[in-house]
Image: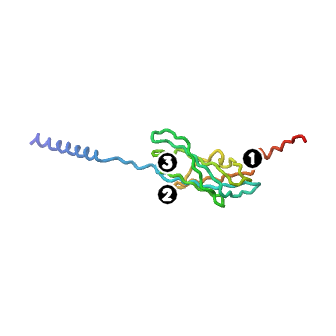
Amino acid sequence: MGATSRSLPLAFSVFLVSLVVVSATDYEYKPEKSSSEKMLTQVIGIQGTILCKTGSQLIPIKDAIARITCLAVDRKGYETAPFSILSNPANAKGYYFATLSPAELEQGWRLTECKVFLEKSPVKSCNVPTDVNNGKTGATLSSPRLLKTMNLYSIPAFIYTPETPAAAAIPPVSRGY
């Protein structure tokens, strides 16, 4: 009874190990997406206002447009050429809104950075862009408000002026007449 009774537990142990290995081959590990991956798969919303500064007054510019320029990496990890989208024209209060959906990107692209710029003022008397809140150099998207269907980024107000400050400071040149 000695040799047979020792081989039974050994055979049972080998059977259990085989069962675990067979079960593990059918199991596919699917890790949870990190919060940053979830953010990149949602629609991105960008909102802000565009104003005209004349003297000490800030006046909303209806139909002004902002430009959103983004960089992405393709599925192989190579950086793509920058691409841009335009916001909807601002309403009477100067408010603009734009959306960018991952479904609109090329297959496998992942956004790495987006910036928002002043693009167009329809007001001829107030169409010189300033760099207030990075309107000319580009405001970087940061700290989104997480909504159910999108990540909403709020950009501080962009400002146009009637003329460049340098041009206003230089007196006109006399032709000597």
Res. 105 mark: 3
**Distance from Cα at disc 3 to Cα at disc 1:** 37 Å
On the image, the x and y values in percent for residue 34 come to 45, 49
Q: Earlier in the sequence, mark 1 or mark 2?
A: 2
Is the residue 154 above or below the residue 177 in the image?
below
Q: Amino acid at mark 2?
A: Thr
Q: Residues within 10 Å of mark 1 (few under 14, many from 20)?
A: few
Q: Earlier in the sequence, mark 2 or mark 3?
A: 3
- Say which of marks 1 and 2 sits in front: 1
**Distance from Cα at disc 2 to Cα at disc 3:** 17 Å
Q: Nearer the viewer, residue 36 or 94?
A: 94
**SS category of the residue bearing label 2:** loop
Res. 164 mark: 1
Q: Earlier in the sequence, mark 3 or mark 1?
A: 3
> Seen from this angle, which residue lies furthest front?
177
Query: In the rendered image, which residue does mark 2 sit on?
Result: 149
Q: Amino acid at mark 1?
A: Thr
16 left or right of 130?
left
On the image, the x and y values in percent for residue 7 come to 14, 41
On the image, the x and y values in percent for residue 110 come to 49, 45
On the image, the x and y values in percent for residue 56 come to 75, 55
Q: Nearer the viewer, residue 18 or 11?
A: 18
Q: Nearer the viewer, residue 18 or 68?
A: 68
Q: Residue at x 68, y 52 (%)?
A: 121
